[in-house]
Amino acid sequence: MSDLLKYDVWRTRYYQGATFAGDFEMPVIKGTDRVPERLIRFSEAKSEKTDDKGAWVVPYEHDVKLECMWSNAFKYMDNLLEHPGIVSWDFSMYRNMPFSLQQWNCFRGRLIGSLYERMGGECIPNIRPTDERSLLYALDGIPTECTVAMGSVGNLRDRNDRAVFERYVGEVVKRLRPANIIVYGDAPDDVFHRANEDGVPVWSYATKTQEAHDAAGKVA
């Protein structure tokens, strides 16, 4: 079997038992209404020196640190399943990307989350704000009234970025009626006002950079 894996370029072993939803057949994530106590990035969870088995594993870092999970997800599953859960993978989806590439990266991230669930773990679906076109599929396969995750790092830098993020928050609240929204990074009121208005709890988690700045400030 191991000799055949190098020919499985479509990662067909990730699809066994998966279900799909919507016109673009996005992988279904069953989801949870739980709220993590704390988060740890995937690259840190891989190291015994920095791992925290009580933290949910999140994928909010550069694609170069995430791609290994797509290449061989089963290599990392035992460790990931020792954590309370994960946020589904966050491969880049830039607004200037071709539509098909955005869709593919969304699909891959959701499939990893679905696979984790099928192996017995709990997954919070990640939603990556991008352009208007991705709203055709970006919320497919995500259950209503569950916890959803969003990463705001680098996505609130200018007026256009904030407007896109705000639009997605509004669509998430309207279409998914989430139990909670967890945010890796800042969650400013002017961007998350629709969630606040509808009584959806928004939980913001400090990034590693913010934690380092806070620690430096306390030392100073």
Image: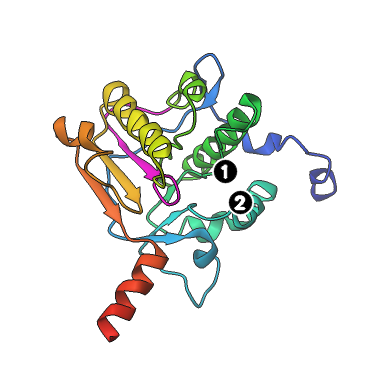
Magenta stretch, main secondary structure class: loop
Is 66 magenta? The answer is: no
Q: Where does the image place residue 88, in percent across and percent down from the top left?
A: 47, 43
Residue 61, image x, y percentages: 52, 55
Kindly identify which numbered label has been placed on residue 63.
2
Residue at image location 44% in from the left, 33% down from the top = 29
Query: Where the C terminus falls, by quadrant?
Result: bottom left
The three-letter code of the residue at mark 1 reads Phe
Name the residue rendered at 43%, 40% in the picture. Answer: 126
Please state if 199 lies on the left or on the right of 149 as rendered: left
Please report whichever mark, 1 or 2, sits nearer to the chain's N-terminal start.
Answer: 2
Return the residue nearer the eye: 98 or 2.
98
SS at circle 2: helix
Amino acid type, residue under disc 2 in the picture: Asp
Res. 176 image quadrant: top left
What residue is disc 1 on? 91
Give the magenta-colored segment's residue range.
142-155
- Reply above or below: 94 against 27: below
In the depicted structure, whether residue 194 falls above or below residue 41: above
Q: Is residue 16 visible?
A: no
Q: Are marks 1 and 2 in contact (CB under 8 Å)?
A: yes
Which picture quadrant has residue 92? top right
- Judge from the rendering whether residue 198 lies leftward or rightward of residue 128; answer left or right: left
User: What residue sits 43% from the left and 50% below the top?
Assistant: 86
> How would you rate the neighbour count of disc 1 (Cα within 10 Å): few for under 14, some for 14-19, many for 20 or more?
many
Query: Residue 102: x percent and y percent?
Result: 59, 31
Residue 107, percent across and down?
A: 57, 32
Task: State how far apart marks 1 and 2 are (Cα).
Answer: 6 Å
Query: From this viewpoint, is residue 100 visible?
Result: yes
Instruction: Report the residue that reaches farthest toward the front.
Output: 159
